[in-house]
């Protein structure tokens, strides 16, 4: 049973560029949440997708946007990259039918903005 | 505003000892409290979780103690092993949204 997968594993971009990160949820899960983890900090909630719609959003600017596809996979897009966007981006999946609280994380995408 | 406060920031324990990590929360709407373990370069892995109607939950060497009136909960790792050396995060959840503490870096010395 495959867990949550994310791609790419590492990415280097320059300020002002745009980036797209991808996530495939755990088999049987229908909900995807995205988190940003700065070095030495806990993950911070960006947003959650269910039924191809953004359902909840944390305190992140509109430069952060996402999408969920019919197969439940998801993308995180960040526009106009800033140096402060350098972080580990984590995707977590859960099942609404299972209550939705238990979230399983992928290995993350390490983004470095130069 | 930090809604989940975690302490200590770092912890050194001898092999076989007990590791204790504490968390406090503010929002009484939180209804689910998981603990995650994270190794360097990896994503957080769910260890154990509790709901506020239960005061204690044990899974193997890991125990969560929960004090609803004090809005505090803690993780106890019994018989700590060098392989337990990692960063531990407490979290609190309203449906769909996990709020994490800042983490505790645990080092277990052989």
Image (cartoon, coloured by chain):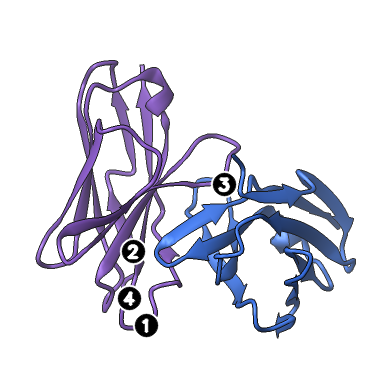
Q: Position of residue A23 (x, y in %)?
A: 26, 55
Chain hosting mark 1:
A
> A89 left or right of B94?
left
On the same chain, marks 2 and 1? The answer is: yes
Choose between B39 and B48: the one closer to the eye: B48
The answer to whether the residue labelled 4 contacts the one labelled 2, judged by CB atoms less than 8 Å apart, is no
> B72 left or right of B41?
right
Chain hosting mark 2:
A
Q: Secondary structure at mark 2?
A: loop
The residue carrying mark 2 is A4
Q: Residue drawn at (41%, 53%), measured in percent from left and top? A: A107
Q: Residue drawn at (79%, 65%), measured in percent from left and top? A: B70
- Mark 3 Cα within 10 Å, few/some/many (few <14, many 20+)? few
Q: Nearer the viewer, mark 2 or mark 1?
A: 1
Nearer-N-terminus badge (4/2): 2
- Colour of chain A, in one word, is purple
Q: Secondary structure at mark 1?
A: loop
Q: Nearer the viewer, mark 4 or mark 2?
A: 4
Q: Is residue A82 above or below residue A58?
A: above
Nearer-N-terminus badge (2/1): 2
Q: Which mark is residue B40?
A: 3
The answer to whether the residue labelled 3 contacts the one labelled 4, judged by CB atoms less than 8 Å apart, is no
- Mark 2 Cα within 10 Å, few/some/many (few <14, many 20+)? many
Looking at the rendering, which quadrant does residue B76 occupy? bottom right
Q: Which chain is blue?
A: B
Q: Is residue B50 above or below residue A103?
A: below
Mark 3–mark 4 distance (CA, rounded to whole Å): 27 Å
The answer to whether the residue labelled 4 contacts the one labelled 1, judged by CB atoms less than 8 Å apart, is yes
Mark 2–mark 3 distance (CA, rounded to whole Å): 18 Å
């Amino acid at each position: 049973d495959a867990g949550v997968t994310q791609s790419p594993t590492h990415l280097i971009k320059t300020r002002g560029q745009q980036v797209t990160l991808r996530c495939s949820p755990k088999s049987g899960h229908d909900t995807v949440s995205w988190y940003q983890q700065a070095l030495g900090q806990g993950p911070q909630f960006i947003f959650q997708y269910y039924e191809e719609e953004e359902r909840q959003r944390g305190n992140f600017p509109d430069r952060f946007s996402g999408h969920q596809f019919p197969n439940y996979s998801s993308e995180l897009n960040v526009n106009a990259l800033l140096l402060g966007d350098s972080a580990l981006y984590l995707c977590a999946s859960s099942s609404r039918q299972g209550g939705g609280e238990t979230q399983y994380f992928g290995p993350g995408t390490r983004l470095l903005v130069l | 505003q930090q809604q989940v406060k975690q302490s200590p920031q770092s912890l050194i324990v001898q092999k076989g000892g007990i590791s204790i990590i504490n968390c406090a929360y503010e929002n009484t709407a939180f209804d689910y409290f998981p603990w995650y373990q994270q190794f360097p370069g990896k994503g957080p892995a769910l260890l154990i979780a509790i709901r506020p109607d239960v005061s204690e939950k044990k899974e193997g060497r890991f125990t969560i103690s929960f004090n609803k009136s004090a809005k505090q909960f803690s993780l106890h790792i019994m018989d700590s092993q060098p392989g337990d050396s990692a960063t531990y995060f407490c979290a609190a959840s309203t449906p769909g949204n996990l709020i994490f503490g800042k983490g505790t870096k645990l080092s277990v010395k052989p």
